[in-house]
Image (cartoon, rainbow, N blue to C red):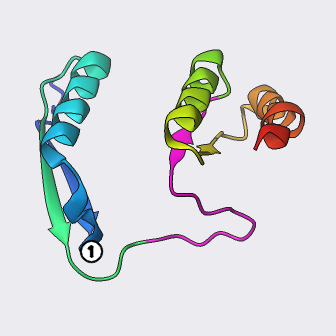
Amino acid sequence: MRTRRIRKLIVPIYGLSGAHYDLVSLSRLLHELIVFTLVEDIDIEFRWFLGKERTVDLPGVNHAENVCLFSGGVDSYAGLLLSQEALGEVEGVFCAHTDQARIIHIVADLQRRIMGPRG
């Protein structure tokens, strides 16, 4: 059975605030990351979208300038700490499925005992 491969990634940039990004460096970094993780040579294309930026407002969720994905593992915890050191304020983002009760408990405990008090 043949699988359809992705050859191009289109990254939307909303509004005029994206004018200050170094898109050449960002494209190169994304390309290297994709090649390393997926072993696929995928072209990166940025597309500008004028108008209101898309946002999602969720009750009880803080808004942060920088976010870092957090899986609950040691490597993503180190990534979160390094991001905070390099960028200042960073919000760790964790997402789990209901069948991951153990990791949800571990991450909640980390937030309550370690991450929360450290900001």
Q: Quadrant of the N terminus?
A: top left
Q: Is residue 4 above or below residue 52?
A: above
How many residues crowd around disc 1 within 10 Å: few (fewer than 14), some, or many (20 or more)?
Answer: some
Q: Percent from the top left, x then y, of residue 21?
A: 23, 54
Quick check: 4 left or right of 100?
left
Q: Secondary structure at mark 1?
A: loop
Locate residue 31: give its quadrant.
Answer: top left
Q: Residue at x 81, y 27 (%)?
A: 106
Which stretch did the figure color magenta?
Answer: 55-71
Mark 1 sits on what residue?
A: 15
Q: Residue at x 58, y 25 (%)?
A: 76
Q: Percent from the top left, x then y, of residue 69?
A: 54, 38
Q: Residue at x 15, y 24 (%)?
A: 2
Q: Is residue 83 above or below residue 79?
A: below
| Front in this rendered view, residue 16 or 57 | 16
Q: Residue at x 22, y 17 (%)?
A: 39
Q: Amino acid at mark 1?
A: Gly
Quick check: 36 left or right of 110?
left
Q: Is residue 109 above or below residue 19?
A: above
Q: Percent from the top left, x then y, of residue 65?
A: 51, 57
Quick check: 81 left or right of 30?
right
Instruction: Say whether residue 60 is magenta.
Output: yes
| Front in this rendered view, residue 20 or 70 | 20
Q: Percent from the top left, x then y, of residue 18?
A: 25, 63
Instruction: Say whether residue 40 is magenta.
Output: no
Quick check: 100 left or right of 32?
right
Secondary structure mostly seen in magenta is loop
Q: Is residue 50 above or below residue 58?
A: below
Q: Quadrant of the C terminus?
A: top right
Locate residue 8: give its quadrant.
Answer: top left
Q: How many marks?
A: 1
Locate residue 93: give its quadrant.
Answer: top right
